[in-house]
Image: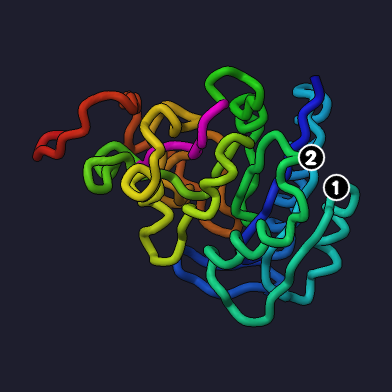
Amino acid sequence: MTMNCLIVFLGETFRMGGQGTRSIGSDQSYSEQIKASKSHIAFIEDLKERKCCRSDVYISTYNTKFNSDLLNIYSNVLIGSDFYDERIGYNRLLHNSVGKIKDLSIYDFVFFSRIDICFKDEFFNVFNPGYPNWDKILFPSICWFRDSKVGNHPRVNDMMIYIPKRYYNYIKNIAYEAYYDGHRMWYNLIGKTDLTYDDLDTMLNTYHDSDSAKDFNPIYYIVNRPICIKHHSEGHIFHKNAIFLRSANY
């Protein structure tokens, strides 16, 4: 059976520098952002060919001199885009884009992703919509083992979110309003809604920091940053139903 999905790419494009850098649109950033966007198209083609999933794409980002180049890459699957002059924050980028989709119910799932990340081949294998364990809200991973908790709940990697149709009503509860809100999403969803641990999970059962410049990540890397090859939590497996207790030795 063919599925339909909406993929929303968000954030700053043609970006240079590490965490917190707001430099966009530089010539030096061009080739890597184009490479990232082409990896998104390869992913979309793989979804269609191997997983019988047809994709629509919405882009929410900021103006640069490369707008037309960016749109051209996604043109065959693009249903809409927003290019803002002023920074409005990731939270508003996400919720503004959702608000412009006329009928979200036509999609079996929505997938939100940072636009400045390049998907690795392993991501194509990991991403399995329709599989039984993909009937939950999924984050890519939990941040590295020794920094894996927020209020005794998992500290999520917030670069991507997969949301099946039955959870669309909870999209309004997705928050990036403050610096750590993205990492606190598991904590917030459990504390502020009726969702339970049965409703949340991860794509990977290994720990990886969201910033691929700080920790090895098997499924993506952030473009125009160094790529870390050291896996700081190697050998540790995330078990969401394990008792989450803080201790000096966790």
Q: Secondary structure at mark 2?
A: strand
Q: Relative to residue 66, is residue 14 drawn left or right?
A: left
User: Which of the 4 image quarters holds residue 154?
Assistant: top left
Residue 11 to residue 140: above or below: below
Q: Amino acid at mark 2?
A: Ser
Image height of 230 relative to 87, above or below: above
Q: Who's the residue at 54% across and 74% down the image?
A: 22
Q: Is residue 76 visible?
A: yes
- First in sequence, mark 2 or 1: give its number: 2
Q: Looking at numbered disc 1 in the image, what kind of residue is underneath it?
A: Val
Residue for badge 1? 77
Q: Residue at x 70, y 58 (%)?
A: 33
> In the picture, which quadrant includes the C terminus?
top left
Measure the alpha-carbon separation of dots 2 and 1. Answer: 7 Å
Q: Secondary structure at mark 1?
A: loop
Residue under the point 16% across and 35% down: 245
| The residue stretch that appears in magenta | 135-143
Of residues 18 and 241, which is closer to you in this image?
241
Locate residue 194, reporting x and y percent: 39, 40
Q: Principal SS element in the magenta part?
A: loop
Quadrant of residue 4 within the rendered picture: top right
Q: Is residue 188 left or right of residue 220?
A: left
Residue 20 location, x and y as percent?
45, 69
Give residue 72's position: percent from left, percent from top: 88, 58
Out of 1 and 26, give the one closest to the viewer. Answer: 1
Cβ–Cβ below 8 Å for labels 2 and 1?
yes
* Count of numbered labels shown in the rendering: 2
Find out whether residue 132 is within the magenta segment. Answer: no
| Residue 55: assigned label | 2
Q: Nearer the viewer, residue 138 or 34?
A: 138
